[in-house]
Image (tube, rainbow, N blue to C red):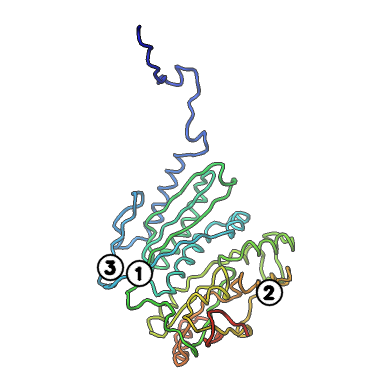
Amino acid sequence: MKPAAESKPDLRTPAATGTKSVTYADAGVDITEGDRTKQRIKMLARKTFNKQVLSEIGGFGGLFGLDLAKFPNPVLVSSADGVGTKLKVAFELGIHHTVGADLVNHCVNDIAVQGATPLFFLDYLATGKLEGSVCETVVSGLSEACKANGCALIGGETAQMPGFYADGEYDLAGFIVGVVNRDEIITGATIEPGDCLIGLPSNGLHTNGYSLARKLLFEVAKYGPTQYVNELEDKTGAALMRQHRSYLPILRKLWTAGIVRGMAHITGGGITENLPRILPKGTAAQVELSSWQVPPLFQHLQQLGDVAQDEMLRTFNMGIGMIVVVPADSVKKAKAILNRANERFSLIGRIVRGERRVQYV
């Protein structure tokens, strides 16, 4: 018998078969627009480069040469984070510049509390349909914040995921790597009873507690995002979009002076959950609630929802974005450094004997 003819795929052109050619753009992914956007992003990222950056944007991996003269005994410190539902406010207001800085500064603070100098940053931006101008605006914020922190933006990912995100929305996350000499790492291990707590002010909610804040302001109070509210002394959207500040410049002055025993970045979980992360066994933190002025934003949020004090303290930073632990005999020196830098601060408590937790008094 003659064997059956082998079935072969029809490789004729769409015109020959009478069908319409389907492209990636038909599926919602515009490669051409993506390429144009990446070219603009490349220019923004290059502004953050220094002599340690050994690669260009667009490679499969970013290359960074470590300065061993400056860090002879290096330990790399890394962190990753996102902006969270603060992005919802950004979408509503059409403000996309500041969220990039929010992300960079958050990550910088997370490694600065261990005495680390930021080296390089990578971002991840995912959206349903790529809007080049929005993407470029977000990355310009990333670039400016990286440059301000002495950190190179050496790469990232811009993903188009049609059907995954609603129109006009995106998600933003970042990854940072820093370095500290092994003998200069700050962990909180030397903290002891009698040490003092110095609180540095936040610039608002920073990047935490937005799900609750949005519920209280927009659903409970039914404010509009551009509405001026007397109790906030600002428009709701403006109050929520205040930028997450970087504490690196002032922290560097303090740790260079050799007076810092520990630092806590007050983010999600508030003082209640973040300060115990640096406490050694057998110590507790006593925080005096009357030692600083809680900003109007937090006061109004609490009033709107009749939110319990404990809930406020473990959801929001309550006006304290960074806590620095110094020995009692170094407080005078710390105050002098802070005053010279025109940095506002409050003495908010001390370290006592006890279990690892915060005692509010």
Q: Is residue 52 left or right of residue 142?
A: left
Task: Look at the image and tell me in which quarter the N terminus lies.
Answer: top left
In the depicted structure, whether residue 305 falls above or below residue 12: below
Of all residues shown, which one is farthest toward the front? 1
The kind of residue on which mark 2 rests is: Gln
Question: Residue 21, how many percent across, how many down?
Answer: 48, 26
* Relative side of 73 to 117, left or right: left
Specify whether 297 is left or right of 49.
right
Please name the residue that numbered disc 2 is placed on: 299
Residue to which mark 1 is pinned? 179
Q: Of label 3 and label 1, which has the lower sequence position?
A: 3
Task: Say above or below: 208 vs 299.
Answer: above
Pointer 3 residue: 67
Q: In what element is the residue under mark 1?
A: strand
- The Cα–Cα distance between marks 3 and 1, rounded to whole angstroms, is 10 Å
Q: Kindly identify the amino acid type of the residue bearing the numbered disc 1.
A: Val
Q: Residue at x 59, y 70 (%)?
A: 204
